[in-house]
Image: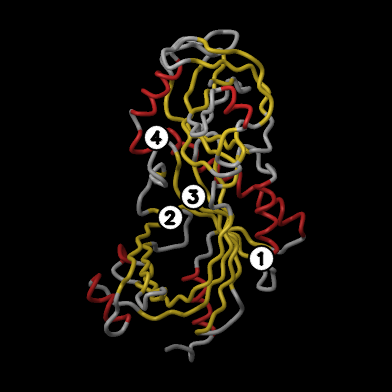
Amino acid sequence: MAVQLPSGDAEVNTVLLRNTDVVRSPYTVYTVGGDVFDVGEWSGYPFVGLVPDPRLAGLLLGGHGLMPLFMISHGPAHADLLTQVRVGDQDALFMWSGNLRVGLDAASGLVPDLLPACIEAAEASRRFLNNHQYHYQTFWPGTEIEHKITLSPTVDIYALATVFAGLVGSGGVAGFLPEYGNAFQQWDFDNVMFEISAPADEAGYVSFIPDSTDTYVMKRKWFAQDAVRRREQKWLHVQVGGSFEDHIREQFGVTAIFVGAFRRTRFDVSCESAQTGNVYAIMVDRCRISDPGGPDLCQVEIEYLHSRTLRSSAAEHVDAELGVLVTHTVRHLDALGEAYEYGSLSKLTYLRRLRHESPAGGR
């Protein structure tokens, strides 16, 4: 069954079709051989939970095993295929998977050989499309890209995070939608940080986060000064037999100095650009400094995470899209009357300042 959905000429990468979306459209039912079986008008969402609407099942002679597969976005200048990559009991997520090489009927956009063309285009990228979570890619592996906004230590981070979640969820940031199945996260973990100051090209820090298996997540960042882009690498399930300092020396051949310890509580609002498939997080966090002690560090971090797309050109939009999210974040902080300072203040710099103010502290 092919249903025509409204579309325009704008490039689109990701579409979320919800069961609250009312689809009113002419439809055409084709046989496997490509002959027209039936035509009519459709109104409503085609599925109830994970199974077809009874009207749809009846129309297609039973068809209980039907599922949404493709969506066609077409206009005078384009005909794009979007393939279903996630399906739930209340919605389905589609992403761009190619340009169709069939001529579309000017009136309806539907032709008998449309389905074979869709299957052929999707098959060409099936390992990317049809394996759960593998439709993500990262354009700059090993590089963190994030903007930081430092807040008052008295801010209510959960209340603020829910404001941003509501903003994204209600369509308040034009062109962005919640990341499917991952729109809101909460984190709470300890962190022990060590500074590396020399040689210059190794400057940065190594930190250790205890996990649930009595090992550590080890994270290293390379930077001489706070910046939006920093080199980053993580290792999971790291076993530390001796001291952290010895482990760093053995692994990297550098000398590390303990700079601080803290407990980080964080709420993440993840969103996706419908145009590009780039995924970002607005993270609101609080770091309670246990060593050397001092005021909590509360921040909003707006970070590029990864991309749900086949188009390499999506990389060209990351900086601009981050800028849009920063603008919306700052605008709402202003509206809420929250005190803040925009910049790139890192936790290393903050701990270094506290250590300078409390030189007697330390392990």
Badge 2 or badge 3: first in the primary sequence: 2
Tell me the distance, in whole angstroms, between the alpha carbons under discs 1 and 2.
24 Å
Q: Relative to 300, is 119 above or below?
A: above
Percent across and percent down for residue 35 are 47, 9
How dense is the environment of label 4, judged by Cα within 10 Å: few (below 14), some, or many (20 and up)?
few
For numbered disc 1, what is the local secondary structure?
helix
Tell me the distance, in whole angstroms, between the alpha carbons under discs 4 and 1.
35 Å
Q: Residue furthest bottom?
A: 360
Nearer the observer: mark 1 or 2; the answer is 1
Q: Are marks 2 and 3 in contact (CB under 8 Å)?
A: no
Q: Which residue has dot 2 on it?
A: 144
Q: Which mark is residue 158?
A: 1
Q: Which residue has dot 4 on it?
A: 312
Q: Is residue 194 left or right of residue 164?
A: left
Name the amino acid, label 3.
Answer: Tyr
Tell me the distance, in whole angstroms, between the alpha carbons under discs 3 and 4.
15 Å
Name the amino acid, label 1.
Answer: Tyr
Q: Which mark is residue 173?
A: none
Tell me the distance, in whole angstroms, between the alpha carbons under discs 2 and 4.
18 Å
Tell me the distance, in whole angstroms, between the alpha carbons under discs 2 and 3.
8 Å
Badge 3 or badge 1: first in the primary sequence: 1
Name the amino acid, label 2.
Answer: Glu
Nearer the observer: mark 4 or 1; the answer is 1
How dense is the environment of label 1, judged by Cα within 10 Å: few (below 14), some, or many (20 and up)?
some
Q: Are marks 3 and 4 in contact (CB under 8 Å)?
A: no
Percent across and percent down for residue 161 are 65, 60
For numbered disc 2, what is the local secondary structure?
strand
Q: Which residue has dot 3 on it?
A: 304
For numbered disc 3, what is the local secondary structure?
strand
Nearer the observer: mark 3 or 1; the answer is 1
For numbered disc 4, what is the local secondary structure?
helix
